[in-house]
Image (spheres, helix red, strand yellow):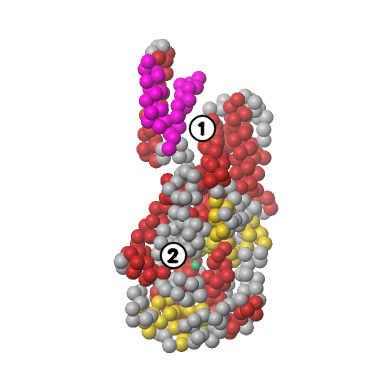
Amino acid sequence: MARNNLLSTDMENQLYIYNTLDRKKEVFEPINPPHVGMYVCGPTVYSDVHLGNCRTFISFDLIYRYLLHLGYKVRYVRNITDAGHLEGDNDEGDDKFAKKAKLEQLEPMEIVQKYTLGFHEILRIFNTLPPSIEPTATGHIMEQIEMIKEIIANGYAYEIDGTVYFDVEKYSQTCNYGILTNRKLEDLLEGTRELGGQDEKRGRLDFALWIKAKPETLMQWHSPWGWGFPGWHIECSAMSTKYLGTTFDIHGGGMDLQATHHTNEIAQSEACNHTAPAKYWVHTNMLTVNGARMSKTAGNGFLPKELFTGNHPLLERGYSPMTVRFFMAQSHYRSTLDFSNEALQAAEKGYKKLMESLSTLEKIIPSETSSVSIAALHDNCYTAMNDDFNSPVLISHLFEAVRIINSANDGNETLTANDLEILKSLVRTFVFDVLGLIDETKAAGANGNAISGLMDLINDIRKTARANKDWATSDKIRNELTALGFEIKDTKDGFEWKLNK
Ligand code: AMP
Ligand code: ZN
């Protein structure tokens, strides 16, 4: 269902996005329509991604998919942090990559490669679309150095013994450093602790743009300030500017990045380019376990693979990737989502019901008149997604579609041929294109098509056997398919099948 309402002035058709900058929903007006530039902070690839990380990337996948569906030409940039991320967000602690490299006895770039591949594999399993550009920090050292030079030249950074710091106090004289978190400089200062080893900084809130290397530092580059490596925040400012320009439409990331990483990104870009980097700041909320944020350090961060197999003390059993994706879409991206076995089991039922309704939809026989309004259903789906990508409300409307489908199949509702076509297109569009679900009950891809064809053939052979009252062959087919893991249900027209995991 192609949709092109970009020039519409109808309020109901306008997309609203919650902008962290203003703490309210605003009409989405791209800077240069129909183009949209979207930058999302990607993973730090020094370890396996946990399910919490996945939630953030799946949330942005939903946003990306809906923007594409509306007809926008989106350039989606999501970086890979492969250098410069110290253990503490305030430039303290060991380098995450160097530490892991020592632990696993690998080169830092072997660590990067290993976990980048793992990250891509997991996101592929969750059926997320790849970004348009996936730049790495190590591939953009020159751009980061140039940006730091400009910030120094503009008077917002200073060098001390090979390390360059951003001058937050100087910046705050003309700009609002706490704009994203709505906090005053005094309050921020109040809440900041003194950090050991950084006595040289002028101000307590100052952060490193470039960090002097020690002789043993594994990843270091030559710069105007000597050998060193970039601070964590500068990579996103440099890469977003390079690929999306000094001001672009959407900047996203998890809410945990607001206070430090994104606050510093805004300051760097303003200090360099004299303009705010993004028009809309979008933040996704956290996946929690028993109310606590899922994280590697808290030890409650299980891996997607553990979730699929059920091999983790917190899991009663395994859940399929699409069950998990559906579970995530059932909550709004700005709400916390608490993990529980009960919630996943309920999501599994809901997901299966939705998939079954898509098969039922194919069997409905059209009538002369419609007893339900498909136009209203259509509008409700768009209104939900236009309201800050409200996927849980969208899903409630899709379940109204499920009710209509099942009732029409049972003869309790009627649909004209035209309405039936609109309904098919609407449900498929929102389920597959926008929510990004795939039907796991039927094997996917070329193999899936082959299996479907084969099952049609077997169905025909069995129908002939039954017509000839050859019950032995009919039962043999049924029993052997069941033994192979297929769930077979006899119908008027032969049988329906599902492939159980
Ligand atoms: P990292 O690899 O630690 O840099 O994190 C990658 C992304 O995952 C960031 O955008 C984080 O905000 C996000 N993230 C980390 N923990 C969670 C969580 N529990 N729930 C949702 N997103 C998270
Ligand atoms: Zn970033």
Work out whether residue 181 can be spotted.
yes
Q: Is mark 2 within 8 Å of ligand 1?
A: yes
Determine whether 413 is above or below 343 in the image.
Answer: above
**For this rendering, which residue is in front, 232 or 398?**
232
- Is residue 498 in the magenta section? yes
Work out whether residue 2 can be spotted.
no
Q: Position of residue 385 (x, y in %)?
A: 61, 50
Q: Identify which residue is drawn at 48% across, 63% down.
A: 297
Q: Position of residue 116 (x, y in %)?
A: 38, 60
Q: Position of residue 261 (x, y in %)?
A: 53, 70
Q: Amino acid at mark 1?
A: Ser
Q: Is residue 225 left or right of residue 185?
A: left
Q: Is residue 292 left or right of residue 501?
A: right
Label 2, label 1: how far apart the Cα atoms are = 41 Å
Q: Amino acid at mark 2?
A: Thr
Residue 9 figure quarter: bottom right
Q: Identify which residue is drawn at 45% across, 29% down.
A: 487
Q: Where the N terminus falls, by quadrant?
A: top right
Residue 205 figure quarter: bottom right
Q: Which residue is mark 2?
A: 44
The residue segment tinted magenta is: 472-501
| Mark 2 crowdedness (10 Å alpha carbons): few <14, some 14-19, many ≥20 | many
User: Which numbered tag is attached to residue 359?
Assistant: 1
Determine whether 315 is above or below 271 in the image.
Answer: above
